[in-house]
Image (spheres, rainbow, N blue to C red):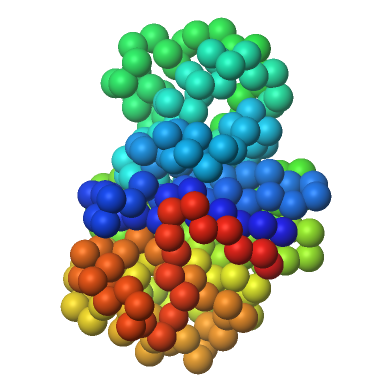
Amino acid sequence: MQVQFVGSGDAFGSGGRFNTCFHVTGERVNFLIDCGATSLPALKRCGIDRNAIDLVLVTHSHGDHFGGLPFLMLDAQFTRRTRPLIIAGPEGIERRLEQVMEALFENSSKRERRFDLRIAALKPELAASFGAVNVKSFPVVHGESGGPFLGYRIEAEGRVIAFTGDTEWTEALIPLGRDVDLFIAEAYTYDRAIRNHLSLKTLEDHLAEIRPKRMILTHMGEDMLGRLGSLPHETAADGMVVEI
Ligand SMILES: [Zn+2]
Ligand SMILES: [Zn+2]
């Protein structure tokens, strides 16, 4: 399977990076993890066929993780998409999607579409399947507004990918990421502990318990970006492709 880091940035475009969006493809799967406000141009820059995407998994409803959905939906309409689309995310995703669509493009949530849209609410600790994609959701800790907040452990085609989403340290990250083939972890700061986000140092303190086979850091703020090249870990970059 292939994972492309369509966008590896934080909410504020640090380093000129696009908002969070990862594209996962294999023989039988084609899905996105998160679709932030800047993700449509990022998908186009990567030359990705948006209408081949079957599923968007959303970790939480902050703009840098789900604010690209109205653009993705309108792009699908204007390019005459017919392939069904599933958008799955934390409880409340349907209402939040409608709100953001109406805020950005009035009446856009009510337009008729040529494709079936299914919106699925995912509950923490439960497993769900979308075609060949099996997802287990974990509750993560990321403040009071924009939740619920989920991290995902995703199995498809014999591989396991985990994504922390945005979160401060929580014990849930251990079963979420244990022994996975690819652990995509937010590392917003280097060693400065801040609320709602992970520092690399905190993550490192727990890596022996998580034991991922491979880890790639994402959602890095200026503090982390200033250390690129001297970090003892792999870091994501926009457009980067990895095989797992
Ligand atoms: Zn974020
Ligand atoms: Zn967030």
Instruction: Tell me which residue sits at (36%, 47%) in the image.
Output: 18
165 relative position to 137: left or right: left
Q: Quadrant of the C terminus?
A: bottom right
Q: Quadrant of the N terminus?
A: bottom right
Does 53 sit above or below residue 160? above
In front: 70, or 235? 235
In front: 92, or 166? 166
199 relative position to 84: left or right: left
Instruction: Tell me which residue sits at (52%, 75%) in the image.
Output: 215
Instruction: Tell me which residue sits at (50%, 9%) in the image.
Output: 111
In front: 166, or 231? 231
120 relative position to 12: left or right: right
Q: Residue 88: x, y in percent?
A: 56, 41
Does 109 sit above or below residue 97? above
Q: Residue 39: x, y in percent?
A: 43, 39
Residue 14 appears in which quarter of the rendering?
bottom left
Q: Residue 152: x, y in percent?
A: 54, 60
